[in-house]
Amino acid sequence: MNFSFRRMSAVARKEFRHVLRDKRMRPVLLVVPLFQLTVLGYAANMDVDHVQLAVVDQDHSPVSREIAARLGAGVAFDVQTVPTEAIAERKLDQGEAEVVVVVPEGTAKGLARGERVEIPMWVDGTDSNRGTIAQSYAESVLRRVSTDRLPTPPHPLPLPGVPEPRVRVLYNPALISRWFMVPGVVVMVLAVITSLLSAMAIVKERENGTIEQLTVTPIQPAELILGKLLPFVAIGLFIALMVTAAAVVVFGVPFRGSLAVLVLTSLLFLLSTLGTGLLASTISQTQQQATLMVFMVLMPSFLLGGIFYPVTNMPMWAQWLAALTPTRFFIVIARSLFLKGAGLDVLAREAGALGLIGFVVITVAMLRFRKRSV
């Protein structure tokens, strides 16, 4: 029997009408993606601000007061002054302080004489990323205070040539971490929703006992599967455009790329996510089992895909595993489209990898479904 587009389109129309008529599916398609993007977008913020900092002022000088004032000038630190180191240490233990700066006695006199003055700093390393960034910022403030307070000789000696860096940050000039994280959240939302939709489509037929009726009709397995998945391709593209618009409007993340490239690469990514859901449905008997199988695949792909951590920081074996996940490549595409405005010529390697992985996943899923249907 030859492949029939008429039979496939009939299944697609039936599935699309079923999705639109199901009142329980409407929040999943419209509300859940926006809710996930909003919650995760605000939660995935790696900017360091409002760090609780305690200053132990043992010098009681204008310099020590200037140090406390400069540390508390911005939004990075919430500064509190404590009288003794013991109290500051107790605040660290109780979580009431994350950084402690001790200004020892004689700091002002030492700086006035041009001496090197050590200022102890204690940092809570429980959150290593937050602690490291807070330490760097506090050190920069202390260096500025020291430089401003050093005496200037009447006849400064000529210094040898020293390279002076002139830093220009591209694509994200303010180094806003949310601009880095939100495109990754967009990929997560698209992957979760589409994988679950395709997994539920087949398992629901099996639970209702209608899958056997479909398999004994003249329709071929390939026609049935493609007809089932085509509505979810359209839904996936709609979700991709919807969450992209929400990322721009709600979080102010610029979208500098082409919508046509976004649609094309999203189609390639949907091959993998829909194939993953289909594959999970072929080895599951209930919707709960299919959901569990989908998340067992998606969670490692999110961790290895570079959504939260750079892939280059991972061990080599983890980088090899990451290269097998479509998330790894679509994350690069999404961030490049949002922040760099890259075109398909730049993203050809990632797009090709997405297409290859998607083709393999969807082919394996269809072959397994055909085997179960025979």
Image: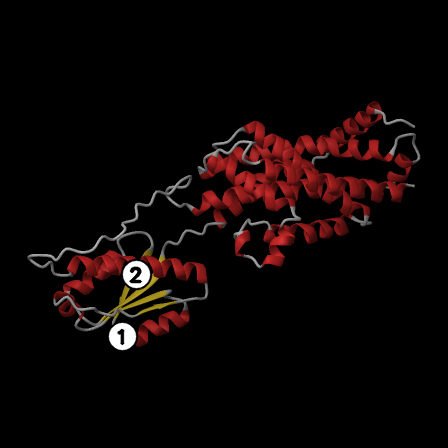
Q: Spot the residue most to the bottom.
A: 86
Give the quadrant of residue 141.
bottom left
Say if residue 347 shows up in the picture.
Answer: yes
Q: Is residue 336 left or right of residue 10?
A: left
- Tell me the residue that label 1 is attached to: 84
Disc ID at residue 355: none
C-alpha distance separating marks 1 and 2: 21 Å
Q: Nearer the viewer, residue 167 or 243?
A: 167
Say if residue 78 shows up in the picture.
Answer: no
Give SS at disc 2: helix
- Tell me the residue that label 2 is attached to: 139
- Mark 1 is surrounded, within 10 Å at the Cα level, by few (under 14), some (14 to 19) or many (20 or more) other residues, namely few
The residue under label 2 is which amino acid type? Glu
Residue 122 rendering spot, x and y as whole percentages: 35, 69
Quadrant of the rendering where the N terminus is positioned:
top right
Q: Nearer the viewer, residue 357 or 162?
A: 162
The residue under label 1 is which amino acid type? Thr
Up/down of 118 relative to 334, above or below: below
